[in-house]
Image (spheres, rainbow, N blue to C red):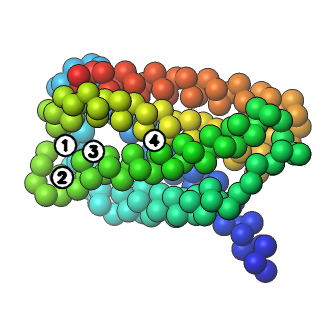
């Protein structure tokens, strides 16, 4: 019974990491990338989201609750899992370790990012180009955000590989190797989008 519950929790944890959290990550990075098109374009994209009906309900159901479960159960996995030295290759064991490390970094970054944006917005501040430019006026915050963004993207991209394996989408060694290259491309592309957005505010 306990093993079945843990298996189910791990599958749910993996699924939520892709849908809806992974999809939201891509959407959020895409909105931030609008900053490279100029202040007016970015503010237009942000304000369009702000005025979406039932925004608060959607945020909690689609974003916050899945993230809370994924984060809490992810912490449990990070501090109880052991490297599968006999099962996976040297490269995969590094990916295994980095998945746990970037998960912790991403959680710290996410809490801070929510505090700086969503919480401040609830207290009356306006989430716009000027807010982000003010945040990035501090060189430390530029580095902090870049590390946080790249960690989140790596965690998602590498998590896609694990998701494909655990859900039986990539069973053979060849399919898993192909998925490795696919997730690497996803990581590079999303990292470019995320880092470009940061420097657009500087």
* Residue where numbered disc 1 is placed: 127
Q: Residues within 10 Å of mark 4 (few under 14, many from 20)?
A: some
| In this rendering, position of residue 180 left or right of residue 158 | right
Name the outermost residue toward the left. 124
- Which quadrant holds residue 134? top left
Mark 1 vs mark 4, CA separation in Å:
18 Å
Residue at 45% over, 51% down? 107
Residue 71 horizontal/vertical position (percent) = 51, 58
The earlier-in-sequence mark between 1 and 3 is 3
| Mark 1 residue element | loop
- Compared to residue 28, the image places residue 136 above or below, namely above
| Mark 3 residue element | helix
- Which quadrant holds residue 187? top right
* Residue where numbered disc 3 is placed: 49
**Which quadrant does the N terminus fall into?**
bottom right
The earlier-in-sequence mark between 4 and 3 is 4
Q: Are marks 1 and 3 in contact (CB under 8 Å)?
A: no
Callout in the foreground (2, 3) = 2
Q: Residues within 10 Å of mark 1 (few under 14, many from 20)?
A: some
């Amino acid at each position: 019974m306990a093993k079945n519950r843990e298996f189910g929790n791990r599958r749910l944890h993996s699924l939520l990491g892709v849908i809806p959290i992974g999809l939201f990550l891509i959407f959020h990075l895409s909105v931030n990338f609008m900053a490279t098109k100029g202040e007016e374009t970015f503010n237009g994209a942000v304000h369009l989201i702000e005025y979406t009906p039932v925004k608060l309900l959607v945020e909690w159901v689609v974003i916050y609750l899945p993230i809370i479960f994924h984060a809490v159960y992810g912490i449990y996995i990070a501090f109880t899992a052991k490297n599968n030295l006999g099962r996976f290759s040297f490269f995969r064991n590094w990916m295994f370790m980095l998945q746990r490390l970037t998960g912790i970094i991403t959680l710290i970054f996410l809490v801070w990012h929510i505090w700086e944006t969503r919480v401040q917005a609830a207290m009356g501040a306006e989430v716009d180009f000027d807010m982000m430019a003010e945040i990035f006026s501090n060189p430390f915050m530029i580095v902090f955000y870049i590390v946080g963004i790249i960690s989140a993207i790596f965690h998602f991209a590498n998590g896609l590989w694990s998701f494909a394996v655990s859900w039986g989408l990539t069973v053979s060694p060849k399919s898993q190797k192909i998925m490795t290259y696919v997730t690497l491309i996803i990581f590079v592309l999303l990292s470019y989008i995320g880092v470009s957005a940061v420097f657009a505010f500087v």
